[in-house]
Structure formats: C-alpha cells, structure tokens
Amino acid sequence: MNPEKTGQVPHPAKPLIALVDCNNFYASCERIFEPALYGKPIGVLSNNDGCIIARSNELKALNIEMGAPAFQVYPLVKRLGITLRSSNYALYGDMSARVMQVLTELSPSVERYSIDEAFVDLSGMEEQSIAFCQQLAATVPRYTGIPVSVGAAPSKTLAKIANHLAKKQPGRNSVCVFQEADDVELLQWLKKLPVEEIWGIGKRLGQKLRLRGIETAMDLREANPQQLKKNFSVLVARTQMELQGTPCIHLDEAPEPKQSIMCSRSFSTSTNSLNDLKAAIRFHCQNACEKLRGQNSLTQAVLVTVRSRSERFKGRAYDASAIALPQATDDTQQILHTAQTQLEAIYQPGVRYHKAGIMLLDLIPWRPMQLGLLESEQSALKEKGGKTQKLMQTLDQLNHKMGRHTVAFGLPVEDARWQMKMAHRSPRYTTCWSEIPKAKAC
Amino acid sequence: MSLHSIQPVGIAGSNCQIPVANSRVSAGFPSPADDYVERHLDLNDKLIRHPSATFLMKVEGDSMINAGMQNGDLLIVDRAIQPAPGKIVIAAVNGELTVKRLALHQGCYWLQPENPKYQAIPLNESNDCFIWGVVSHIIHQCA
C-alpha cells in the first residue's frame, strides 16, 4: 500500500531531536563577567567549599578529579594558576533560565532536562536542521555568554551520543547532526562506545549486559530483542529501540540527569492563584524529596520554575532562580520552605501559569560527612535511621507546629551562624543590585 | 493595587510596575477610577528588548563623560544587538569589562573614550580584546 497513492495517510514527520548542552556550565558562568578567567583552570566547589563539583577543560587537563576535596587542591592553586569558586546558585540559576529562554524563542518545542541541558524537537525540519543547529550553537553564546554543544539524531539516546561527539571531536564546531540512525559515522562510533556509557544504562546495568556479551552500544542495538526482554527491564528494550532510531523515551520517563532530580507538570487549566502554585510546588517538592531519600542522596540547591503563555510573561517563560541550601539535606520541610520562598519571589499577580515544578540540584550521596553545627563526627557516623534522624523528625514536627526556629540547634558561640561556608563565591552579578558587574570607564 | 519595587532585570520577573491609576479605599464607595485600572506601564517593556540577552552594569570612572555617562550610572547592556561603529559597547580589555565607543578608523577598530583625558585603545588580538555587548540605555539618577 502506497500512502501517497491513497492520499489519506499523511507522511509522518521524520523524527529528529537535538540535545543542547552547556559546556562546563558552572565554570562558563564564572567566566562571563570575568573575562580574565578565559583559558584559565577553574574549579567550582560544593556547598561549604568541600569538594570540586565542576571543572573547566583547563582544570580537567590538570588531572584534578571531580569530587576532589578542596584541601587537596588549595596547595596547587598558586603554582598552577587555578581559580577556585564557591558555588553561586543565584548566578547559575539565572544563566540557566536565560539559556532556556533563548532556546524557546528560537524553537517551538523545548524540553528542559536539567540545569544545563534541554531537548529541542526538530522533527520534520529535514535539510534545514543542520543550519538550525548551527544557529542554536551560535545564538545561545552570543546572547548569554554560555557556550553550548548541539547534537541531533532521530532519538534522545542517539542525540545524547551526537552531543558527545559535537563536544569532543575537533572540527565539528560544537554541532553534530545525524539525520539517519544508520549514518555510517554514527554506526562506527556505536561500535566503539562502551555499553555503560549509553544514556540510562550506567555501570551496574552495563556489567549485567557485558555478562551476556553486550559490550558496546552497537552490540545492544543488534542484540536479540526477545532475549533482552526476557533478561532485562523495559528500559533496556526501549534503549535498544532508541539506538535503532525509534524514539520511545518521553521526558517524564527519561533517566534522571546526573546529580539532579526534577518534578514538574502542567496544570489541567492555567491558574493565577499563588495558593494553587504553592500547592503544586508542595506536591512536587514532596515527590522530589521522596526520590531524593529513595536514592540515598542529599541536595544542595533548589530551583523553582513556573511557565506561562501569557502576554505579560512573554520573554520570561523560564522564570527561575536557584537557591543554595545552608547545608546539604534531604529534609522535606527545609527544601519545601526554600521552594515556597522562591516561588513567592518569582510569582507575578495577574499572570496565568500553566506549569510549575521543582529541581533539586547537585545531589551528593548521603554519607557521614555533612556535619551540622552541633553534630560531632560520632553522631554523624550513626546510622541514618538512628537517633539523629529521630531527633530531626521531632524537631521538624515541633517547628512545624509552633513556628520556624522555635527549636533549633545552636550554642551561644561567637560568629556561630547557621550559615554555609562560601569563602570564594563570585558576586551575584545578575540577581542582586549591589553586586552587578562594573564597567570600567577609566 | 500595589506598587512593586524594581527587581533585578532580565528574566527574573517583570515587577517594575507603575500603576496608571491608584486609589486606596478603606470604606464607603470605591473610586470609579478603579474600574479602569488594568494596565501598568512596565519599564522593562520599554528598556529591555531581549530579556535573555540583557544585563545591567554600573559605570566606574569618567572616561565616557561626554557621552552623558557619569560615574555610578546604570547601563543596560544588550548582547543581542550587533556591535557597529558609533555604538557604545562593553569590551573585554586585558581581562576587564570596559565601556567605550566603538570606532572604525583607517580600517581598524578602536575603543574610543568620550573624554579628552583618555586615550583610544586599538581593538586587536594583542590585548585579548573582544566586544562583550552593546549599551542600549544609560540610566542616571538625579534625585
């Protein structure tokens, strides 16, 4: 049956999905208002300046690993010309919102995936897709100062791989488009790509696949689907289809981006009520915190996002700001409180919103290292479900009933403020009046 | 009806609202004018063409005094505007953000101050120069 002959079945748009990924996002944010940092090694530290959580290419080249404790890097700072920065979530959140905004202005269909990644639907664009990807890769840095890489392919999993090539292969100029899933170059790369590096597969699943002789992305693509279904979860079967070029991972089901959790949903009807938004944030926040505790992680920053199609909201579709928590936590109440405060700050009366959500950023594994003001090593070393946890629960309940800070940790110690250490934070250039950049006229 | 304070520009919410009419009624008849209050003049609409590409900066120094730019003035910088000779630009020079007028002289680009006390800077690779953005507005506080 030829659909063209009958004229009844419309030709479906050929799927093509681009992943836009900011290059070394945190380090790039640090450079925008400090051009002296271009070409220099930059490391961004976790809350309380504990360890390296983001690196510029120059720092990677010095073999300083992700997660390296700050005290190990400090002695090298002078000799190697390294700049270390405390994390500046106000700046990163605002820059992220700007990047997403530029993408939404250029393209009708953008799905934010993490603080520094978004999927853009290019289906049906055919030949123009390459020029369009080049336009994305040029406009985002021109508007925001953040360099990006763009990889496009028929499915999200393949787009992720194309993006990797856009970033790493010299001569690609940050853009890599595979219109077809059986592109010769793509197939060659799939043969080289270790199975655990595929989006959503990871180390543990990778080991299991290797036991069955599936070692590369190509092996998985060509594996017997019945065998796969028998031995593995539906995720593996879907990943196989994605590798073959059939898009079947929707964003809601997409694997969690590294080190962050996102919960958001569109409303059935748009709303301009702050109470409705608060309820939505409360709902998503509780879900996100459950996920957080479920994977035994703590979060270090919270980002609230709302969206609206309203005229008054135009150009501001991604109203967002990220707030660093005083301490890495999995405490729903603390996270919720931060989220509600943020929501109140970005809410505009009279605007009808159609989507609200929350993102937990820079997750770290729960381990007995995050010391509170009064916690000693021993108490922190106790089991997670132990006395500390119970105390926290009781405390939370009391505070909840009787108002915040009714009961709190603290001894009358000089300068002992419930505040995180951030000795090297750059100014909040874009979100704080007293910290806006200076333009030298002298 | 409330008069919101001006918030950091950009995409962080358009909160700079100046009510067209405003009346406070504690009891009795509501003001008939209230029926017509629905629109606000939003300075962001007027001053910011490309929210995602717009940044605020503060002037430090007097090298642009003849362009009406005084020490401490607020600059609205739009990275989406194409730099061109004659435009006031923010340029990165030797690792610092500098405000100057872009000039084209005998086939070369220069960063031209607007104060005879200062010298023009050639725009070339040797001093790591690049144009960061174009100044779209100068805001001067006078009261």
Image (cartoon, rainbow, N blue to C red):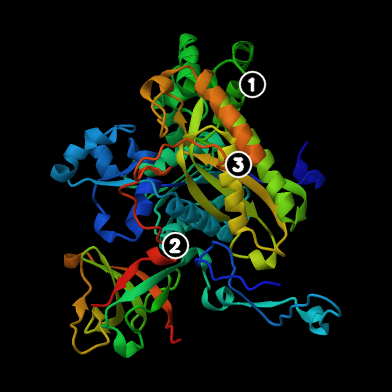
Chain of the residue displaying label 1: A
Give the residue pinned by disc 3.
Answer: A336
- Nearest the viewer among A272 and A39 is A272
**In front: mark 3 or mark 1?**
3
Residue A66: give x, y in percent of width and height. 33, 33
Q: Nearer the viewer, residue A200 or B45?
A: B45
Q: Secondary structure at mark 2?
A: loop
The numbered mark at residue A234 is: 1
Q: Is residue A356 left or right of residue B52?
A: right
Q: Amino acid at mark 2?
A: Cys
Does label 2 lie on the same chain as label 1? yes
Quarter of the image for residue A145 reads bottom left
Q: Amino acid at mark 1?
A: Val
Measuring 27% from the left and 83% from the top, which residue is drawn there?
B62
Q: Earlier in the sequence, mark 3 or mark 1?
A: 1
Same-chain check, marks 3 and 2: yes
Residue A120 shows in this picture:
no
What is the CA distance from the residue labelled 1 to the residue labelled 2?
Answer: 47 Å
Could you confirm whether marks 3 and 1 are on the same chain?
yes
Q: Amino acid at mark 3?
A: Leu
Q: Nearer the viewer, residue B35 or A233?
A: B35
Most extreme residue toward the left, as rendered? A79
Instruction: Residue lying at the far front in this picture: please name it.
Output: A412
Q: Which residue does the image show at 74% across and 78% down from the upper left?
A: B24
Residues tagged 3 and 1 counted as in contact (Cβ below 8 A)? no
Residue A371: percent from left, percent from top:
40, 30
Disc 3 and disc 2: Cα gap in Å? 23 Å
In this rendering, is residue B59 above or below A426? below
The single residue placed furthest to the right in the displayed view is B29
Say which quadrant the N terminus of chain A sits in. top right
Q: Which residue is mark 2?
A: A432
Task: Identify the secondary structure beneath mark 3.
Answer: helix
